[in-house]
Amino acid sequence: MRHLTSIRELTKDAAISLLDNAQQLSQVNDREVKKLPALRGKTVVNLFFENSTRTRISFEVAAKRLSADVINFSADSSSVSKGESLKDTAQTLEALGADAIVLRHPLSGAPKLLAEQDWISASVINAGDGSHEHPTQALLDALTIRQGFGLSHNLSGLKVLIVGDILHSRVARSNILLLNLLGATVTVAGPRTLIPTGVEQMGATVNNSFEDALSAKPDVVMMLRVQKERMQGEFFSSTADYSKAWSLEGDRLAMVGKDALILHPGPMNRGFEISSEAADDPRSQVLRQVSNGVAVRMAVLYRCLSGEQL
Amino acid sequence: MTSLILKSLTLPNGSGADIEIENGRITQIGSVSGSGIDCAGLQALPGFVDVHTHLREPGFEASETILSGSKSAAAGGYTAVMAMANTSPVTDTAEVANLILDAGTAAGFVEVQPIGSVTKGLQGAELSDIKGLSESRSKVRMFSDDGVCVFDEDLMRQALIAVKAFNGVIAQHAQDPTMTFGAQMNAGALATELGMAGWPAEAEESIIKRDAELAEQTGSRLHICHLTTAGAVEVVRWAKSRGINITAEVTPHHLLLTEELVRGYDSVYKVNPPLRKLEDTLALREALLDGTIDVIGTDHAPHAREKKECEWQNAAFGMVGLEHAASVLQEVLIQSGASWERFANVLSVKPAQIAGLENQGQLSVGSIANIALIDPAPKRVIERQTNSKSINNPFAGITLPGQIVHTIFKGRFTVKNTQVQEQQ
């Protein structure tokens, strides 16, 4: 595996082996010396065309724990704002010695394009592109679910409910693909205007009622972050109306099974798509997701840069 | 007197013959005595006519010039191309039209006939000087805002009325802009997975239906550019059954390629209207076979490399097509059992009629010698580079049948033994 730009690139076995590696690497986080020499001498560039402090820091920590050198390149403070093309930016970074480019881009497909064109030979890792995919987020979610249910292999038989703005969500798309690959069944729920056409063909059942979806007793409830600026006008009448129907709070939180897990990719809008009560509930996995994010990204970086499993 | 004899070729009706050409005209078809160029095994056809070519000059010469586009056309077996109006300046005046006409004549590889824009500056607000264009030296007969749709219904009606006076035609780019804002690819499950805004079939079909009704009311000629959906085929079929004066074109790429190619986000496959699903492609092929679709229009749309070497959403729409249309049509039509006469009709005779080109689309004694000679036998892997200045070639790497061996334009070889022949 040289690149990771889409969950579509993974076989079931490859995904499971990545999760196994991440599980081993997550133990590094608990050590006193949190560092392995695995990628010493390698250079990882975080190329971010869109702000995302959390994802950038997570990749940075992951690369540093493997002893790689890390360069953070933020597109808005660079030559890109002067009109440089993605090709030129990537080739410049490679000329500076980049072995891997971790790419966050507002346009869907930019990482795939960079990986498949013959512009550079560096590895390309997708850190979120437009409303396409966010594969490492899906992997860290899967790792969290596996740990939560004490599973050692796939997610066979688990029911996962994803709630919110599916239309614009790259997290939802990567999760639908990966969860299906690992044997889980996926339901998506949200306002009709925020459910994209044909999502069923990706492997999700659609439900337009949160309560109805909860009554099916999902094992995992994954709340998506709502981008409030998208909740106006054509998609939803008002933010208050959105919360009323789609926030995980009160009676709806009570419907979540006692052994179920609550996930959220962060950052959370407390009191909007998720209540503080739900966010701080013992079933909430939000912080475990963050630490698993580092482990998963270590596994992906290692796999892409060394070409080996651990 | 210059004389040329083509020996032992095959005519569109399947019979063998020789053709004698004198002073740019066909003087004999049959058994001609004397020596000449051996054309055994070659299929002779009237030179091809493209009703939909973007030559990019004036204004975008980094992508294509009238000369480079003309050479590419000749290499594809064409002897005439209709030059779309979305140049800079737009072909909305006689001056621009005449400039294109003259540059085409000077290039000398094909007949270059300018298409006038329907609206000034392609802005969709006010009609161009349609009368002035029609009465100019260029005698413009076809009008199109291709690249954008003439969306204002009343303006479209007025345009149809305006061209009726001289038996002109409006070529519509059918795309409801309100349904396709920011659209990047065919709408549906794949667009959802790839996270891109979709271009729904209804946006094409609703405009064709509306314009067919306008053509019925006005009694004017309407041509639909680049049909792409199974539903659009149904609308055209319906309009023809009502006797509406409508013709339709399909591009080589929509006959062969599908949206699955978008998966790699390689913008060589970005085109407007977008590549559709396999079921649409099959419906288009069937419609071409049964005559619902009249002609091939290449929508040859060259773009400089930097317009394509970028993120999909930032890339220009369009792909080249002049040099592969005949091979695609051979694959689609001849392999399905249709005749070379039908092939000639789709690629030459009917397009010449739609465009109003009197010296094209004929292979008969007395007509101007505009002839394409194809060797149908070879199969070849298409190379990216063609005679076009641009390399946004979606057929690169695909194996297609047939090879243009000679192209004769007004009695002169523009292509001989597959090589483009520079002017003396």
Image (spheres, coloured by chain):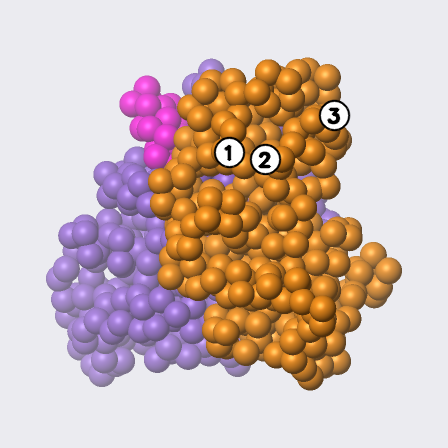
Chain colours: A orange, B purple
Q: CA distance from mark 3 to mark 1?
A: 21 Å
Segment colored magenta: B225-247
Q: Secondary structure at mark 3?
A: loop
Across and down, in percent, residue B378 comes to 25, 73
Q: Nearer the viewer, residue A286 or A74?
A: A286
Q: Nearer the viewer, residue B20 or B224?
A: B224
Which chain is disc 3 placed on? A
Residue contact between numbered discs 2 and 1, judged by CB atoms under 8 Å: yes
Across and down, in percent, residue A112 comes to 55, 60
Which comes before the other along the chain, label 2 or label 3? 3
* Residue A283, numbered label: 2
Q: Is residue A42 above or below residue A11?
A: below
Q: Is residue B203 above or below residue A306?
A: above
Which comes before the other along the chain, label 2 or label 1? 1
The answer to whether dots 3 and 1 both sit on one chain is yes
Amino acid type, label 1: Ala
Q: Secondary structure at mark 1?
A: loop
Residue B147 placement: quadrant: top right
The residue carrying mark 1 is: A260
* Residue A271, numbered label: 3
